[in-house]
Amino acid sequence: MTGSGSLLGLLLAPVGAAVGGAKGASEAQSEDVVDTTRADLRLAMQDTDFAEDLRARLAASTIAGDIVVSSMTSGASTAAQQSVTNVSAGSAPSHIIALEYRLAIFHQAHVNPKIALIAQVTAQVQSPDRKQMLHKATWTYCGQPYDFVQMAANNAALLRGQINSAAAVLAEAIPYDLFVSKVPRPLKGYCMDFSDLPSGTGTKAPGLI
């Protein structure tokens, strides 16, 4: 549930920290509501396979034209993925791209907070022998913030939707930005603006901070 402190620092917090501060506050939700909310959010983060969704979408991507994903493997770390790209299927790979992702919950207030998903993926473009790192870039998807109880309602449907949207947007943005686009991706605070993606399904940065 937590993100690496080196990525977004105090912006990222465990679900318990994001909603647990409501306990004991006069204007807060009841303890039972907070506990149920926390459990539903945690379950959504645990049983939604962001990594596999992202892998499948990247493998099927045609956004970079002739550059295709020839194979994908999982590394030793559960947070790491590796994909191989080449100019034509069947030829030797021209690059190896190692991907690492982080998912976490963003919140500002400690009582009745609005929360949102933060999904961050870092890509290292490496030489075929993996001895040289040719390029490194990071993408940060920020979901729209909602009241924490609303986010957890209906089996955390809103949070699950944000996780799915993050995988879809990042699977398009990563190859597009690496191999097609010639301009840097716009930032709004820590969040990226994906509204220029060719599919038209990208989102504007909500400006969480």
Image (tube, rainbow, N blue to C red):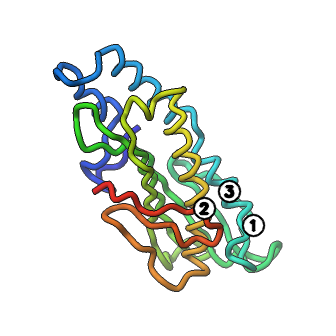
Residue at the extreme top of the image, as rendered = 32
Q: CA distance from mark 3 to mark 2?
A: 14 Å
Q: Position of residue 73 (x, y in %)?
A: 66, 55
Q: Position of residue 160 (x, y in %)?
A: 54, 39
**Quadrant housing the N terminus:** top left
Instruction: Work out which quarter of the rendered image holds the C terminus and state it.
Output: bottom left
Residue 143, position as x, y percentages in the image = 44, 50
Q: Nearer the viewer, mark 3 or mark 1?
A: 3
Q: Image height check: is 7 above or below 1?
A: below
Callout 3 crowding tier (Cα within 10 Å): few <14, some 14–19, many ≥20: some
Closer to the chain start, of discs 3 and 1, is: 3
For image coordinates 24% across by 24% down, the residue present is: 28
Circle 3: residue type: Arg
Measure the C-alpha gap from mark 1 to mark 2.
25 Å
Quarter holding residue 96: bottom right
- Check whether the beta carbons of the residues at disc 1 and disc 2 lie within 8 A of each other: no
Mark 1 closeness class: few <14, some 14–19, many ≥20 residues within 10 Å: some
Mark 2, residue position: 201
Whether the residues at callouts 3 and 1 have beta carbons within 8 Å, the answer is no
Disc with the residue nearer the chain's start (1 vs 2): 1
Residue at 39% across / 26% down in the picture? 38
- Is the residue marked by circle 2 packed among few (<14), some (14-19), or many (20+) residues within 10 Å? some
Which is nearer the N-term, disc 3 or disc 2? 3
The residue tagged with tag 1: helix, strand or loop?
strand
